[in-house]
Image (cartoon, rainbow, N blue to C red):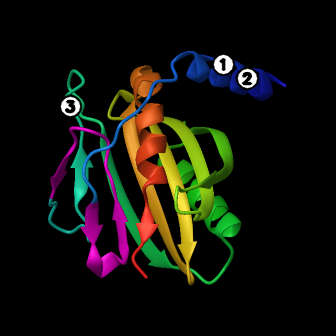
Amino acid sequence: MKKASFFLVFTLVFSIFVLNAQTGNRHTESSGNFSICPPLNWTAEVIPGLTYRIFIGPQQGNFRPNMNIVDEYYSGSLSEYVSLSTAGFTSIFPDALTILNEPFSTGSGINGKKILTFYSMAGVELCAAQYAFNNENRMYVLTYVSMSSRIVDFINSFDESARTFMFLR
């Protein structure tokens, strides 16, 4: 019951802060078979060891909101994949609290899941908004991270950006 009440309050807070979020220019990753528009004024950066570029937002104190995209082969369902990924996240961050796991669709009609998780890393309270999609047994996960205290400022731009995600073929 506490979880349900917390979720209801959290949802109401989100709806109070609904803004017309804007996205930046479309970014294409041909090798990953996808494109996406990051949040407005976010910059793409190459990080050695990562397959795809990450996107970095404006500085928030000692933290910059960011977004990364990963993909991997998985032959099970998207729901199974999300459950396993959530369990893996919790094993890395034992204090993680997932408060949302619901269907999500892109503007081009790709159906997926949206997961919202609060956790702490190196003493910083964070929130990860993840959007998971399946394309022929290849799972794609878009992870947007902001400070927990600022998630109401970013959640709409994260949703709008994720809605622009599309497969190239």
Rendered location of residue 99, percent (x, y): 65, 36
> Which of the two residues, 14 or 35, is positioned nearer the viewer here?
35
Judge the density around disc 2: few (<14), some (14-19), many (≥20) Cα neighbours within 10 Å: few
Q: Position of residue 55 (x, y in %)?
A: 25, 50
Relative to 145, does residue 33 appear above or below in the rendering?
Answer: below
Answer yes or no: do the residues labelled 2 and 3 have beta carbons within 8 Å?
Answer: no
Q: Earlier in the sequence, mark 2 or mark 3?
A: 2
Residue linked to disc 3: 58
Which element type, helix, strand or loop, lies under badge 2? Answer: helix
| Label 1 secondary element | helix
Callout in the foreground (1, 2): 1
Q: Is residue 159 left or right of residue 37?
A: right
Distance (Cα) linking label 1 and label 3: 26 Å
Query: Is 24 drawn above or below residue 105 in the view shown?
Result: above
The type of residue carrying mark 3 is: Pro
Q: Residue at x 70, y 27 (%)?
A: 7
Q: Please state the horizontal and vertical placement of residue 8, each as a whole percent of the image.
A: 73, 23
* Residue contact between numbered discs 1 and 3, judged by CB atoms under 8 Å: no
Three-letter residue code for mark 2: Leu
Residue that carries the numbered disc 1 in the rendered image: 12
Q: Are marks 1 and 2 in contact (CB under 8 Å)?
A: yes
- SS under mark 3: loop
Query: Which residue is the site of mark 2?
Result: 8
| Residue 69 forms part of the magenta stretch | no
Residue 96 visible: no
Badge 1 local density, few (<14 within 10 Å), some, or many (20+)?
few
User: Does residue 18 appear anywhere in the picture?
Assistant: yes
Question: In this rendering, would 111 be left or right of 150?
Answer: right
Segment colored magenta:
27-45
Q: Earlier in the sequence, mark 1 or mark 3?
A: 1
Image quadrant in which you'd find residue 158: top left
